[in-house]
Amino acid sequence: MKPNYFIQNPLKRSFLLKNVKSKNGIILLILFSLSFLYACNPSFKSLSQEKNKYKLTSIEQLADANYAQKIEDFYNKGKFGYFNGKENTAIYYKVFKQAETEKAAILIASGRTEAAVKYKELIFDLYKLGYSIYIHDHRGQGLSGRMTENIDMGYIDTFQYYVDDMKYFYDKVLKKDKHQKIYLLSHSMGGAISMTYIEQNPKDFDAAAFSSPMLGFTFGNCAAVKILAGKEIDYALGQGKYNDDKVSFDDNHLTGSKVRYQRMVDAFEKEPKAKLGGATYQWVHKSCLQFKYIFNHVDQIQTPFILFSAQNEQIVNTSAHQSFIKKAKEHGKNCVAYTIENAQHELFIEKDKQRIETLNETLNFFNRF
């Protein structure tokens, strides 16, 4: 249980006590007390600094040009292909199959705007540990087919198609290779897709992990978006095309690691066709509908899962994480949740401490099943 920052920080606490006798001070005290209670969610555990027990790549290693090139060379050797998803949309995928005895297979479900090229370091690390890795670019992004004339728009006509594509990938590509164990590793939008998947296909994975899953939004109102999501496809408020001039580490709300942030930007510069711009009203609306579906089908989950919520999250709604875990526990589901302190949304490309904590617990969890 982690105290709220404003209560824990001595400067903020001093300011609060000095002003508590005033009307404004009383209001501040009430607000801070409420936020303190909100932050103390007994379902979410905190992690102390952990050793790099799995020998995951460090920022220091990434700074070495020879080491960084090893990751590039490894990624380029992965087998790639396409399959026809729903409505004949071409879905791009990559496979990194262990040449000899494998520990298990992992399917990675990426977030919105993402592509396999963003996951080079993670794939490299997991493969070194003996896992075979399977990853596909979701429809409408990465190197998969787009569904709008303006290929920069983040759009989905039916959210279920994301899930159907994953099921096809699982059945026709991943499952064809023989694996003793199969795990699911997801991030952000991939978390919403993956949570739906395990609700609909409870026997496919031995365990699942969710990094900053998209189970609710921090912005806007789903009811308002429903009105704005007309037949004409248009960017949602504040969204627009991919803008290279706005790709700045100082302005980002994704990660505190400048090295890993720049690697992400560089990956898309090398593969410009994988870039995607902002979300449309239609994508936001369909996502809002999916949140309801996910919460209404918690009872269908049989897959053990672990969920990570970033303390400094600004992309998805962490209160939705708390609500979902609470409901899952009420249904007796085998799940555990952690708050990653001093972390932003992108836990897999965060600073070493936060990344190691997340992946250590993920791999520890997988080892149990």
Image (cartoon, helix red, strand yellow):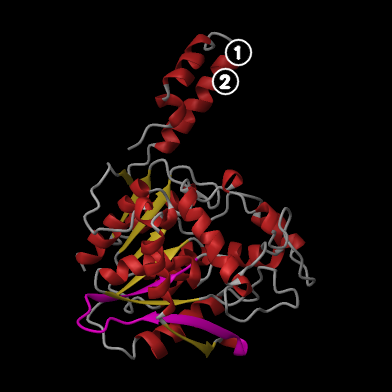
Q: Residue under circle 1? A: 23
Q: Secondary structure at mark 1?
A: helix
| Image spot of residue 74 (x, y percent) | 38, 74
Q: Identify residue for label 2.
A: 27
Residue 227 x/y as whole percent: 75, 61
Tell me which amino acid carries mark 1.
Lys
Residue 79 can be seen in this image: yes
Q: Nearer the viewer, residue 52 or 358?
A: 52
Q: Closer to the camera, 325 or 14?
A: 14
Are there few (<14), some (14-19), or many (20+) residues within 10 Å of tag 2?
few
User: Could you classify mark 1 by the number of other residues whose Cα lies within 10 Å: few (under 14), some (14-19), or many (20 or more)?
Assistant: few
Report if the CB atoms under discs 2 and 1 are less than 8 Å apart.
yes
Position of residue 105 measured from the top left corner of the image (x, y, whole percent): 30, 77
The amino acid type found where label 2 is placed reads Ile
- Residue 43 seen in the current view: no
Residue 273 sits in quarter: bottom right
Q: Is residue 225 placed above or below 36 in the rendered structure?
A: below
> Is 157 above or below relative to 236?
below
Specify the farthest residue to the right: 232
Residue 55, picture quadrant: bottom left
C-alpha gap between disc 2 and disc 1: 6 Å
357 vs 37, left or right, is left
Q: Which residues are magenta?
A: 87-110
Is the C terminus in the top left, top right, bottom left or bottom right quadrant?
bottom left
